[in-house]
Structures are given as structure tokens and as C-alpha cells.
Amino acid sequence: MSQWPSLKAGRVFKALQKIGWVTVSQTGSHVKLRHRESVFPDYIWAFHDKDEIGPRMLARIAKHTGLKPQDL
């Protein structure tokens, strides 16, 4: 069983902002995020707020952004 739940993309995006990710630019629905402390490389966010993100995709996002289950 995965430690990650299924969540709406809007909630995950807000959690990323809370842990230090800021919007650098946006082209259409693709948002380029950068961590304030430059700990991670830039990340492209391409989800709509109401999209459902499953546990597997959430684990991938966490790997690239440093997101933890308790941050949600």
C-alpha cells in the first residue's frame, strides 16, 4: 500500500507553494516552478486544479520536488 493518497491537483499545488515553490512563468496551462532556495531544479506543473492525481504520480512529483505526505 502506498503512503500517498489520491488528491486534487489544486491541493497539491498549494502544498508545493507552502514548502517553498514559486511560479516563475506560465505558458498556457504549464506553470514553471522554482524552489526559493534553489535546492531542486525547476519543475513544470501541467495539471488543472480539478484533475485527480493518483498515488503513483504523486510519488513521482514528490521525488522531484521534495514533497512529503505530511506537507499535504
Image: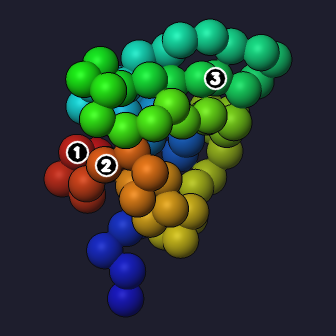
Q: Which quadrant: the N terminus?
A: bottom left
Say if 25 sits above or below 11 in the image: above
Mark 2, residues whose alpha carbon is within 10 Å: few (<14), some, or many (≥20)?
A: some
Q: What SS does tag 2 mark?
A: loop
* For residue 26, above or below residue 3: above
Residues at marks 1 and 2, CA–CA distance in whole angstroms: 7 Å
Amino acid at dot 2? Leu
User: Extreme right residue here?
Assistant: 28
Label 3: which residue? 31
**Residue 25, horizontal then vertical, whole percent:** 62, 11
Q: Which residue is mark 2?
A: 67
Where is residue 45 drawn, in percent x and y?
61, 34
Q: Which is more N-terminal, label 1 or label 3?
A: 3
Alpha-carbon neighbours of circle 3 within 10 Å: few (<14), some, or many (≥20)? some
> What's the amino acid at mark 1?
Asp
Q: Would you say 1 lies left or right of 43 here?
A: left
Of circles 1 and 2, the one toward us is: 2
- Real-space Cα distance between discs 3 and 1? 20 Å
* Cβ atoms under marks 1 and 2 closer than 8 Å: yes
- Picture quadrant where residue 47 is located: top right
Of residue 10 and residue 27, the one placed in the foreground of this image is: 27
Residue lying farthest to the top in this orientation: 25
| Residue ID for mark 1 | 71
Element type at mark 3: strand
Residue that appears at 62% across and 34% down: 44
Q: Residue furthest bottom?
A: 1
Q: Are marks 3 and 1 in contact (CB under 8 Å)?
A: no
Task: Give me the residue at 37% from left, 38% from top.
Answer: 40
Q: Is 63 above or below relative to 20?
A: below
What amino acid does circle 3 point to?
Val
